[in-house]
Image (spheres, rainbow, N blue to C red):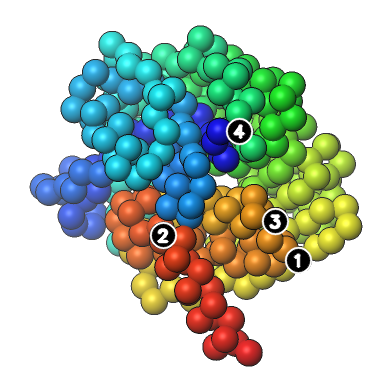
Amino acid sequence: MVDIISIGEAMAVFVPAERGPLRHVRRFEKHVAGAEFNLAIGASRLGLEAGWISRVGQDEFGEEIVRVLRSEGVDTRHVHRSSQPTGVYFKEYSALGEPRVLYYRAGSAASEMGPDDVDPGYIASAQILHVTGITPLLSDSCLQATRKAIDAAHQAGVTVVLDPNIRYKLVAPGDVPAVFRPLLQDSDLVLAGENELRAILLDDASPLERLEEAVLDLGPRLVVVKRGASGAVARTAAQRVEEGPFAVQRVVDPIGAGDGFDAGFLAGWLRRWDLRRCLRLGNLVGACATGVHGDYEGYPAWEEALATLERHQSASR
Ligand code: KDG
């Protein structure tokens, strides 16, 4: 029995030790990461039984990915090996603005994942199937694997959670509605950025409340809008809850914060917390991710997260 299963790609990540264009960078730190891999680790740290479905290469990076997952307590029984290499990406820190991400993942081990890698019985043993919009864009076989996982979840009454995680290096802006609307329609819970919802719904003018309603009209019973430094909103047919962000001392790197938010929100939701407390935990885990260069390394353990929530609540009383 697992609480949450995610399906996707993890890669070796090279984080520059210096700012500026990569052509001038001489030193890198190696990490491993990937949106769904990050989510599984975040959930496991928060006390959930988490599983991850993927393929990794028969190479050093594949070994490291599996070793990290096992050391974090994530179920790797459905991680398969491939003769293709594990994907790689680089971060680039410019002097201005957000970090850039450069992928070397075409033809990677994970892009070879297909329907045969998805065991419907395994999906049926979970409470949540977490999918992102990244995996279906990796290859046709990954799209089929994602579809099979979603169909298996529907048949077994497993909650499907979608984080669109739109990556414009993988999808042309004009294709976003066609790719992502069906995914929204197939989801029970949606955890998304405001700009992502605007891109999917082709609506850059309506107030946020109207966007939330448009998502609910498509089928999901809960939509959570992640608003970074402005906090987050959770919306159902009956309720709308807004929660401010967790103050962060210094943002080192925001990549991985969204996946951390998902892990925190869902860890509360599975424990049947009220939506405000789920948002708080999501915001907290997301904030913790921003203090380090790796995607997941900053995520807190369960006791630490509870103690921090408690401290913040008593400070605001
Ligand atoms: O959410 C973090 C991810 O964006 C990062 O780890 C890389 O998985 C990745 C992707 O596909 O962009």
Q: Quadrant of residue 87?
A: top left
User: Is disc 3 placed on a helix, strand or loop?
Assistant: loop
The residue at which mark 2 appears reads as 301
Q: Quadrant of residue 230?
A: bottom right
Residue drawn at the location 38% of the way across and 67% of the way down? 251
Q: CA distance from mark 1 to mark 4?
A: 27 Å
Amino acid marked by disc 3 = Arg
Residue sitting farthest toward the left: 26
Of circles 1 and 4, the one toward us is 4
Between residues 104 and 205, which one lies in front from this camera angle?
104
Residue 78: image quadrant is: top left
Q: Amino acid at mark 1?
A: Val
Q: Which one is in front in this view, the residue at disc 2 or the one at disc 1? A: 2
Circle number at residue 55 = none
Looking at the image, residue 211 sits to the left or right of residue 71; the answer is right
Please tell me which of labels 4 and 2 falls first in the chain: 4
For marks 1 and 4 on the same chain, the one whose residue lies earlier in the sequence: 4
Q: Quadrant of the N terminus?
A: top right
| Marks 1 and 3 close (CB-CB < 8 Å) | no
SS at mark 4 in the image: strand
User: Dot 1: what SS?
Assistant: strand
Q: How far apart are the alpha carbons under marks 1 and 3?
A: 15 Å
Q: Which residue bears the numbered disc 1?
A: 241
Q: What amino acid is at disc 2? A: Ala
Q: Residue 210: x, y in percent?
A: 84, 54
> For mark 4, what is the residue?
126
- Residue type pointed to by label 4: Ala
Number of the label disc, if any, that sits on residue 272: 3
